[in-house]
Amino acid sequence: MTPISELFESGGRNTPRTDTDPYWGATRVGHAKDLSYLDAPVLLRTERTLSDAGLNQSNSGLVPRGSLLLSTRAPIGYMAFADQPTAINQGLAG
């Protein structure tokens, strides 16, 4: 038995306010809701995207391609793999 923290790096993130238009635009940002629509456990697209300014404003950064994403807010318990580097909001852990 090995603690999961010794096998994987995990963490949650946040994204900027949605009412600030210059922060939204190009880089995919995953939300728990995005995982609820999947037919297969791979996140290929997201409802929202962040601009470079938005990515710099948040602490999200990008989880690497192949990261396991887990919804931690409603809906809870959905899982998927990121098919490309993806920003995540506070409703996901990666």
Image (cartoon, helix red, strand yellow):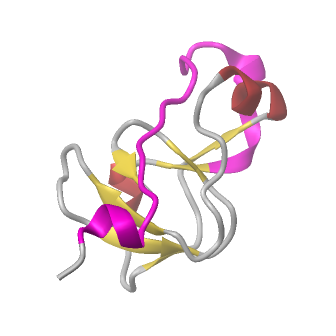
In the rendered image of this protein, does residue 48 appear above or below residue 57?
below
| Residue bounds of the magenta highlight | 3-28
Determine whether, in the image, residue 51 is placed left or right of residue 92: right
Q: Position of residue 26 (x, y in %)?
A: 78, 45
Give the residue at x 66% y 50%: 62
In the rendered image of this protein, does residue 62 appear above or below residue 17?
below
In the rendered image of this protein, does residue 1 appear above or below residue 19?
below
Q: Is residue 50 visible?
A: yes
In the rendered image of this protein, does residue 52 appear above or below residue 22?
below
* Residue sitting at the far right: 52
Give the residue at x 65% y 72%: 65
Q: How many circles with numbers are drawn on the protein?
A: 0
Q: Is residue 36 visible?
A: no
Give the residue at x 37% y 67%: 6
Q: Position of residue 70 (x, y in %)?
A: 32, 61
Q: Position of residue 39 (x, y in %)?
A: 36, 83
Q: Quadrant of the C terminus?
A: bottom left
Give the residue at x 38% y 51%: 93
Q: Quadrant of the N terminus?
A: bottom left
Quarter occupied by residue 51:
top right
Determine whether, in the image, residue 7 is placed left or right of residue 62: left
Nearer to us in this view, 23 or 2: 2
Membership of 19 in magenta stretch: yes
Quarter occupied by residue 82:
bottom right
Quarter occupied by residue 69:
bottom left
